[in-house]
Amino acid sequence: MKNYLLIFSIALLSFSCSQSNDPEPNQANCDCDKVVEKTTFNVVGTPQNPAINYHTVYTTINECTHIQRSKTYDTTDPSLIPQIGQCR
């Protein structure tokens, strides 16, 4: 009887340890190069063309491959400047 109880206890313990209640990790978006750092410079135009240009140097990291890239972006519209956390 003791052997039966010992074997049953070991089997029960092994089943309880093998089951994982951890949630599945979030699926990474492999098409997303997430902006992690940015620096924006304001370039003032000439008197003939007084528009302000925004020159942005930013760094992205791909969520799947973890490849880091440095990119640049120029615009005259401040709402189009890359933001941290944005996919580019």
Image (spheres, rainbow, N blue to C red):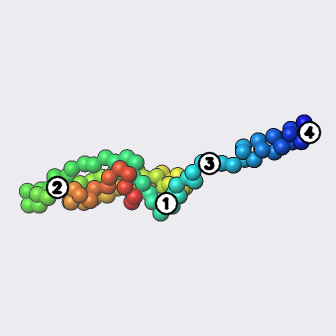
Q: What residue would you read off at disc 4?
A: 1
Residue 44, numbered circle: none
Q: In the image shown, does 50 or 34 lie closer to the viewer?
A: 34
Furthest-bottom residue in this view: 31
**How many C-alpha atoms fall within 10 Å of the one at disc 2: few (<14), some, or many (≥20)?**
some
Name the element at disc 3. loop
Q: What residue would you read off at disc 3?
A: 21
Name the mark nearer the viewer: 2 or 4: 4
**How many C-alpha atoms fall within 10 Å of the one at disc 1: few (<14), some, or many (≥20)?**
few
Q: Earlier in the sequence, mark 4 or mark 3?
A: 4
Q: Quadrant of residue 14?
A: top right
Name the mark nearer the viewer: 2 or 1: 1
Q: What residue would you read off at disc 2?
A: 52
Furthest-front residue in this view: 1
Q: Earlier in the sequence, mark 4 or mark 1?
A: 4
Asked if disc 2 and disc 4 are in contact, CB closer than 8 Å, the reply is no
The three-letter code of the residue at mark 2 reads: Ile
